[in-house]
């Protein structure tokens, strides 16, 4: 004779009929309707960060002199000059630069209506 369940440790069993319990809760928290306005504005602001990131990456990729200048000043822990060099690539958003002996982290920030909305961090190894 075939059983309709599998034996597991004493108090557990799994019916083989595809039983799925219904755990609906009538007291579940209700959420307000979704408003995508701020999310869309953040995405648009992030596009400007992507454009700035491309400018910086293009400069590193195409100008060995620029890359050398950034690395030399980073080696001297001259954050101010490294930031200045990166700003001179034509970026429009605020930038923060951190570097280690292994590489550089470039953080670009954007805001919408004076609210910080998005950030792009690039980590490049040298």
Image (cartoon, rainbow, N blue to C red):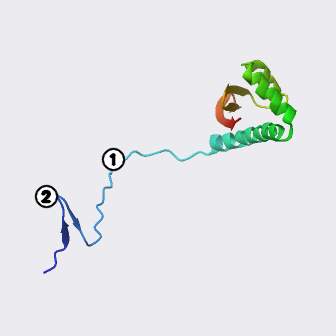
Relative side of 32 to 123, left or right: left
Q: Position of residue 19 (x, y in %)?
A: 28, 67
Relative side of 21 to 51, left or right: left
Viewer-proximal residue, 46 or 56? 56
Q: Position of residue 84 (x, y in %)?
A: 81, 23
Residue at 74% over, 24% down: 74
Q: Quadrant of residue 69?
A: top right
Q: Position of residue 33 (x, y in %)?
A: 53, 47
Q: Quadrant of residue 11?
A: bottom left
- Farthest-out residue, bottom: 1
Viewer-proximal residue, 84 or 113? 84
Which residue is denoted by mark 1 in the rendering? 27
Give the distance between the C-alpha atoms of the residues marked 1 and 2, in whole angstroms. 33 Å
Q: Nearer the viewer, mark 1 or mark 2?
A: 2
Q: How many marks?
A: 2
Viewer-proximal residue, 25 or 12? 12
User: Label 2 near label 1: C-beta < 8 Å?
Assistant: no
Q: Position of residue 50 (x, y in %)?
A: 74, 41
Q: Residues within 10 Å of mark 1 (few under 14, many from 20)?
A: few
Residue at 85% over, 36% down: 64
Residue 90 visible within the image: no
92 relative to 81, above or below: below
Q: Quadrant of the N terminus?
A: bottom left
Regarding mark 1 in the picture, which secondary structure is present there? loop
Which residue is denoted by mark 2 in the rendering? 10
Q: Quadrant of the C terminus?
A: top right
């Amino acid at each position: 004779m075939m059983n309709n369940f599998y034996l597991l440790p004493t108090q557990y069993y799994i019916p083989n009929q595809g039983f799925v319990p219904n755990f609906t809760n009538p007291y579940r928290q209700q959420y307000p309707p979704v408003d995508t306005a701020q999310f869309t504005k953040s995405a648009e602001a992030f596009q400007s960060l992507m454009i700035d990131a491309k400018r910086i990456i293009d400069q590193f990729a195409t100008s060995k002199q620029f890359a050398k200048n950034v690395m030399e000043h980073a080696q001297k822990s001259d954050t101010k000059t490294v930031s200045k060099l990166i700003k001179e690539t034509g970026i429009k958003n605020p930038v923060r630069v951190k570097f280690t002996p292994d590489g550089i982290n470039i953080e670009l920030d954007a805001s919408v209506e004076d609210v910080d909305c998005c950030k792009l961090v690039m980590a490049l190894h040298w």
